[in-house]
Image (spheres, rainbow, N blue to C red):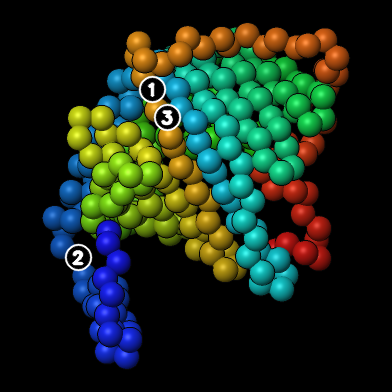
Amino acid sequence: MSHRQYPKRLGRARAGLLAATFLFVPLGDAFADDARDLLKAMSDYMGAQQNFSFSYQSSIEAVSSGFEKLQFVSSGTVTVSRPDKIRATRAGGFADVEMVYDGRKLTVFGKNLNAYAQVEAKGTLEDLADRLADAGVEPPGADLLSSDIADALLDGVTDAKHISSANVDGVPCEYLAFRTPEVDWQIWIEEGPKPIPRRYVITSKNTSQAPQYTLEIRDFKSGSEAPAGSFDFNDAGSAKKVDLSQLEMIDELPAPKEEDVQ
């Protein structure tokens, strides 16, 4: 969406009026249907990919007791081989983590801690996602790794909009927005025959200052273009094996101080 320049005084009033008009004029059901259709097309495309990989950048916001919003940024890679294999990395200012699942065993390696934990967890990636969520651990963009993304994301949605066309990293995308009672979320889906999710934003609207989680996907490759992934954990030999509950400091956020973060 291009930025339009206006004469300063008139422009500010006009821009404010346009913003107010956009916010308060209800969008018809066609916009909601279109948003759901675009999301379903993306979901079907992603669900059909058996082997794929991408790099990403994520950011998560925290709000201090003084209402200062802080943003913590991480980046990494994800390689998937359906139905039951994944390798994901995440490096940020507070943690450097690798997660490997070979269909039988999950390994979480805290490189910054030089320690790893292994859990027997036979099943599909959907089975693994449920177990990880119960343990408070999620791979990057876990919602977008489901074999039926639309079913996972549309649960609880009360409002859907196809906002506009947009560009993400120079790639033409469709910009969609959805609402649930607890969160608002937005997604930017690549236009054309490969409707890849390029950007995903979740806003926790019931939390003070409405902090956001943002995931941006780059270098998406699938099929024969995707690099052959290794899903074995190769420990250099010096890392200590510990219980998963002992793997502290592997989150994207630093351990919060009660007086500092709400």
Classed neighbour count for the residue bearing mark 1: other residues with Cα under 10 Å, few (<14), some (14–19), many (≥20): some
Q: Disc 2 designates what residue?
A: 27
Residue at x 57% of width, y 25% of height: 88
- Give the number of the mark in front: 2 or 1: 1
**Separation of residues labelled 2 and 3 (CA atoms):** 34 Å
* Image-based side of 240 in relation to 67, left or right: right
- Return the x and y of residue 201 as percentages of the image width and height: 45, 51
Q: Nearer the viewer, residue 259 or 237?
A: 237
Circle 3 sits in a helix, a strand or a loop, which is it? strand
Q: Earlier in the sequence, mark 2 or mark 1?
A: 2
Question: Which quadrant, please, contains the N terminus?
Answer: bottom left
Where residue 118 appears, as percent x and y from the top left, is 72, 17
Which residue is located at x 57 percent, y 20 percent? 87
Q: Mark 1 and 3 residues: CB-CB less than 8 Å, in contact?
A: yes
Mark 2 or 3, nearer chain start? 2
Task: Identify the residue shown where x is 31% and y is 49%.
Answer: 167
Instruction: Give, as a three-letter code, the residue at label 3.
Output: Asp
Residue 93 is at least partly visible in this image: yes
Residue 219 — which label?
3
Seen at 53% across and 51% down, the residue is: 213
Query: Are circles 2 and 1 on residues that touch, CB within 8 Å?
Result: no
The part of the image, by quadrant, that contains residue 192 is: top left
Residue 114 x %, y %? 82, 24
Q: CA distance from mark 2 to mark 1?
A: 35 Å
Say what amino acid the circle numbered 1 marks.
Lys
Q: Nearer the viewer, residue 250 or 91?
A: 91
The residue carrying mark 1 is 221
Label 2 or label 3, whichever lies nearer to me, is 3
